[in-house]
Amino acid sequence: MSSDEITLTAGDAEVTVRPGDGGRIGSLKVGGTELLRQGEHFGSFPMVPWCGRIRDGRFRDGADVHQMPLNAAPHAIHGTARDGAWRTARHSLTEDRAVITYELTDPWPYPGLVTQVVELAPGSLTLTLAVETYGSSFPAQVGWHPWFNRRLAPDAEPVRIDFAAAWQERRGADHLPTGERIDPLPGPWDDCFGMPDGVDVTLTWPGQLALNIASRERWVVVYDEQEAAVCVEPQTGPPNGLNSAPRLVTPVSPLEAVTTWTWTSPDPR
């Protein structure tokens, strides 16, 4: 655990931010109940400067081809910022807001600055990611990879995932989208879905809590193949998006995304 851990509070919610541990949200407690899976590599981490897998770890920018480390061989996965130490730029005195930053560096070939703003309010958590360049324009993606506990208590019912996607990206044997869009299939999933009106996914722990994950972005990866946790990942493009759907960061146009998680007590029925 990083020594520069930040604790935010608002209403009955408490969030722990760990700048030194990949800029991740280490904990989200509502009414004293932990929503995020605990342990190394879990919590909720920012995916920057790409999301999901890059095929063979390579992406093209114009005539240049760049090779990223194969940390999920034969692919590169989830960006570089989750493995780095972020810095605390600003922490509000009311302890409901933190701003942390990360300098893009090797093995990423372009210098730049990533900023994450964490804002806690009674009943909601808003996360904002922005990528700026110090010079050259470059393709990038941003997103979040939260690990939500499947059960909030050992004897409780498992979480239910509800969403209505316009399409599902057909997944190939290499776990990357083939480029074909199909009607959404029933789970279990490790799949990317398209939601052109914005990400809108609700997790319901029956009788305990309902949490809505919203973003104006149109892509979300849902992963529920693990017994302990499920993931709902809003992002600015699909897996392998640096090659298939690049978003360009320029000196006058940073890449920014926002997600808001809102929770309520569900109808006991």
Image: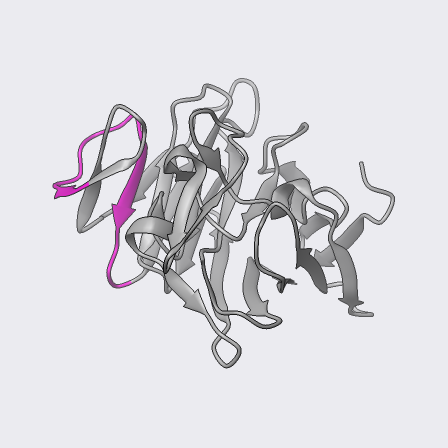
Q: How is the image coloured?
A: one colour
On the question of residue 58 being in view, the answer is yes
The location of residue 233, given as percent across then percent down, is: 43, 45
Q: Residue furthest right?
A: 3
- Nearest to the observer: residue 265 or residue 159: 159
Q: Quadrant of residue 11?
A: bottom right
Q: Residue furthest bottom?
A: 252
Q: Which residues are magenta?
A: 179-197
Q: Quadrant of the N terminus?
A: top right
Q: Quadrant of the C terminus?
A: top left
84 w.r.t. 227: above or below: below
67 w.r.t. 110: above or below: above
Q: Residue at x 20, y 42 (%)?
A: 168
The location of residue 253, given as percent across then percent down, is: 47, 77
On the question of residue 121 being in view, the answer is no
Q: How many marks?
A: 0
On whether residue 183 falls in the magenta region, the answer is yes
On whether residue 84 falls in the magenta region, the answer is no
- Nearest to the observer: residue 100 or residue 48: 48
The location of residue 258, given as percent across then percent down, is: 48, 64
Q: Residue at x 37, y 36 (%)?
A: 55
For residue 219, side relative to residue 169 (left or right): right
- Nearest to the observer: residue 161 or residue 187: 187
Q: Residue at x 81, y 48 (%)?
A: 5
22 w.r.t. 127: above or below: above
- Nearest to the observer: residue 125 or residue 10: 125
